[in-house]
Image: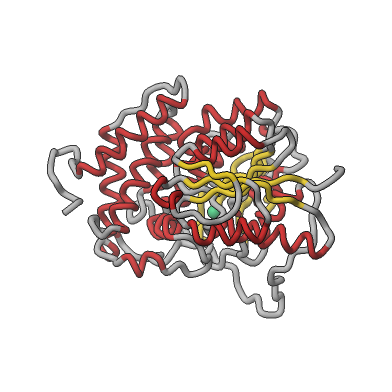
Amino acid sequence: MTGKARVFVLGSTGSIGRNTIAVIDHLRHSGDAEFEIVGLAANSSVRELSEQAEQLGVGHVAIANLDAAENYRGPGRIYAGPSGAAELIRNNARPGDTVVAAVVGAAGIEAVIAGIECGCRIALANKETLVAAGCLVMPMAASAGVEILPVDSEHSAIFQCLHGEERLESVERIVLTASGGPFRGRSRDEMATASLEDALAHPTWSMGPKISIDSATLANKALEVIEAHWLFGLPAEQIDAIIHPQSFIHGMVEFVDGSILAQAGPPDMRTPIQLALTWPNRAVAPGQRMSWTELRELTFEQVDHDAFPMIRLAWEAIRDGGTAGAVFNAANEAAVEAFRARRLSFGGIFEAVQAACAACPPVPVVDLESILNADASARAVVQSGVNADGNLSWIS
Ligand code: MG
């Protein structure tokens, strides 16, 4: 490669975005690889965005929230509004650029599609894109000859374990590990009234609020099961999850001959971010190394699907196909939003998602419009608080 590799960081003020900027800075200092960040996108954190743009000398920024965009005082051309990130890409991306897609939620879909259309390599941290729109995005990427490199640690693990494996028939199943979150071992009743603060206290990973709450409900693992379905082309029956509280093994592939390959390492998001940027090469990373002298045990537990029903709903969504993934994702996003606004109990998140999945039967996906419609219907069910019985049961 000649010159610097150009990168767009979408969701630059979030946990993955900040870490991406740190990784790129580290790679530059270590002399391993030169990346130039040419565009940044954020939702509403304009102060941090302007600092980033200033520091990195970025010429283009996107700000999803229109009110926030008015207060932006940093450098660069501004693309404002919900489609701003997609416009930023369409107007500035060149084939071979990298788009780090780290916007949270279904809001990130359009920009990923724009990146694919521009021939960009996608470093995907926005799992909701594949959960809701995998049936559009994956064929699009394949026909454009665009690589989608997972940033999610579990999928980065599976991706690495499958590398060089040409035949999917050789795979018996893949297993995603889950830390179990802060409520591991609790029954449904015991966590029904858990507080927002408790739900945000993740034991092993430091992450943004949406994904922290998703880790507490195991919706994060459920979304990752659907994400894995689209990334690796496997049916629901061949995708499993297991609780592994140490978060040392990130994912495993079990082959038909009984062999299991696992990818492991200290839990540090910079590792999969860096790999997605440098792949197929590896570069020295600054993170902590495994301390083999301190390692005592690696433990595994079965997921309690009665207490945490989200993964079952994910398997169902894969089997149902069509808009089922979009409905599951949107219902969960709306429920988490209501929980963060203290309008919904922790236990109500499960109820709301289950009710929305039941109320919005899947229809075939024709285009992005079908996905956005399903997304809106699911959100409406959760927001109205009307469950299958017509009771206002979960939002006060
Ligand atoms: Mg993950």
Can residue 150 be seen? Answer: no
Residue 373 coordinates in the image, percent (x, y)? 35, 28
Q: Nearer the viewer, residue 299 or 27?
A: 27
Residue found 31% across the figure and 62% down from its top: 187
Task: Give the position of the C terminus as an image quadrant.
Answer: bottom left
Q: Decide if residue 119 is in sight here.
A: yes
Number of numbered discs on residues:
0
User: Residue 122, percent across and down?
Assistant: 64, 40
Q: Position of residue 26 (x, y in %)?
A: 74, 63
Residue 30: where, in percent of width, then height?
A: 81, 64
Q: Residue 381 vs residue 278: left or right? A: left
Tell me the quarter of the image containing the N terminus: top right
Residue 125 vs 91, above or below: the answer is below
User: Relative to residue 39, is residue 13 depicted above or below?
Assistant: below
Residue located farthest toward the right when viewing the structure as drawn:
2
Query: In which of the image's four quarters is ligand 1 placed?
Result: bottom right
Is 387 situated above or below 13? above
Residue occupying image coordinates x 55% and y 51%: 176
x 51%, y 57%: residue:
178
User: Residue 194: which quarter of the image?
Assistant: bottom left
Q: Quadrant of residue 101?
A: top right
In this rendering, is residue 307 above or below 390? Answer: below
